[in-house]
Image (spheres, rainbow, N blue to C red):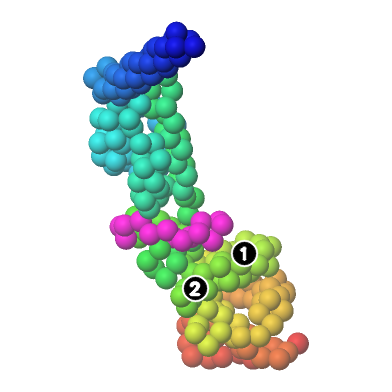
Amino acid sequence: MRATATKRSWKQKFFIFAFICAFFALLNTGYWFFQTDRFPIQRVKLIGDMAHVSHQTLQSVITPHIQAGFFSVNVSKLQKELLLLPWIKRADVRRVWPGQLVVHLSEHDPKAIWNDEALMSREAILFSPPLTDIQSLNLPRLHGPEGKHMLVWEQYLSIEEKISSLHLRIVTLELAHRGAWQLQLSNGIQIKLGTQDVLVRLQRFVDAYQKALSQESRPIAYVDLRYTNGMAVGWATNTKVSNIRK
């Protein structure tokens, strides 16, 4: 019995010793793997068309991270920092063996300027690049109260569809704090739509423009559609206003 117990004790000691040796060997292997000079990141591959974010800007964000080495680089943190760049819409960072970091990037596609201080994408996402970037873009200018950008964008799309047959574009669209809509077209005409039945009133303008207003030799300053069945037309050359009723 004593011999059996002694044998069992030696087995336990052996397994403990073997476990300790394996543990330290693993630690040593891990230390060896995570040494940056042994497994450096040798190449960064950027995928994506960057029209507004410079290579220098991307380099300034990525370089501090790759110094950690292939196994130690924090891809999640790098991804978050890339997304902080105002033009970046999506960022995906992953390691590719051996020694390569692949960075997939895509930019926002701006469709309008919001309140002269931000840009808006087709998904009505607001982002705020430098004002110099905003001012350099020839985009429709949308204005409205804070938090109403999605409503204004949806109305913009509806109006664009309505006037598509006129071959005109919206230059500005404004929603006032009291809920009144007005816009300016690419031919300089300002249209006052009021607060109710906006698209119905706009259709009235489309019909009148196709039938008569587009043939006018006098430049039109504005069209006021805040009437039940008609509109007022103001001419740019003088103060005369014509009332057109259906």
Q: Which residues are magenta?
A: 119-132
Looking at the rendering, which quadrant does residue 2 occupy? top left
Q: Are marks 2 and 1 in contact (CB under 8 Å)?
A: no
Residue 25 seen in the current view: yes
- Return the residue at label 1: 157
Which element carries disc 2, helix, strand or loop?
loop
Residue at coordinates 53% horizontally, 91% vertically from top-left? 240
Residue 184 seen in the current view: no
- Amino acid type assigned to the residue bearing label 1 in the image: Leu
Q: In the depicted view, which residue is nearer to us: 202 or 157?
A: 157
Query: How far is disc 2 from disc 1 in space, using C-alphas?
Result: 18 Å
Q: Is residue 156 left or right of residue 104?
A: right
Say how many tags the image has: 2
Residue at coordinates 47% horizontally, 78% vertically from top-left? 145
Residue 88, horizontal then vertical, whole percent? 42, 47
Residue 206, label in figure: none
- Amino acid type assigned to the residue bearing label 2 in the image: Gly
Residue 124 lies in magenta, yes or no?
yes
